[in-house]
Amino acid sequence: MTKLTFPVATRFSPTFHGVWSDHQSRDGQTFEVLETLLIDDQDTEDGMLPMYRIRFPDGVVIEAFPEEVDADVTFEEGGR
């Protein structure tokens, strides 16, 4: 299994990239980052994955993966 390490985002994308089916309908929407979370993840070298609690303009709050909000992370399968 390939080990992946994601740094905590320092530059967020201006819009959400819905690469996962749960939130694809929000693709292209603006968002506000509320907080950074560190989630246990055995697929990363350090065992932690940053995720982000974000709020969309309509008030809906979700937890987003780095490839959905980080301007410096790309995700080939998601088309970015």
Image (cartoon, rainbow, N blue to C red):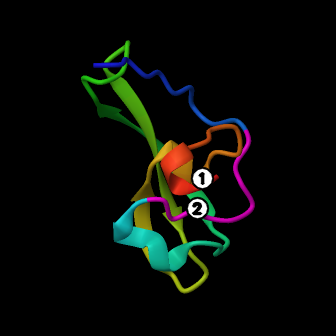
Q: From where the camera sits, is residue 1 visible?
A: yes
Q: Which badge, 1 or 2, is on the more N-terminal residue?
A: 2
Question: Dot 1, crowdedness within 10 Å: few (<14), some or many (≥20)?
Answer: many
Q: Secondary structure at mark 1?
A: helix
The numbered disc on residue 69 is 1
Residue type for callout 1: Val
Between 71 and 36, the one nearer to me in the picture: 71
Q: Position of residue 60 (x, y in %)?
A: 45, 78
Determine the residue positioned at 51% across, 65% down: 18
Relative horizontal placement of residue 39, taking residue 12 as reference (left or right): left
Q: From where the camera sits, is residue 34 visible?
A: no
Between 32 and 27, the one nearer to me in the picture: 27
Give the residues drawn in magenta, as a range.
11-19
Between 66 and 36, the one nearer to me in the picture: 66
Residue type for callout 2: His
Q: Is residue 12 magenta?
A: yes
In the image, is residue 31 above or below residue 66? Answer: below
Q: Secondary structure at mark 2?
A: loop
Q: Is residue 38 magenta?
A: no
Determine the residue positioned at 24% across, 23% down: 42
Q: Mark 2 = which residue?
A: 17
Relative horizontal placement of residue 71, taking residue 67 as reference (left or right): right
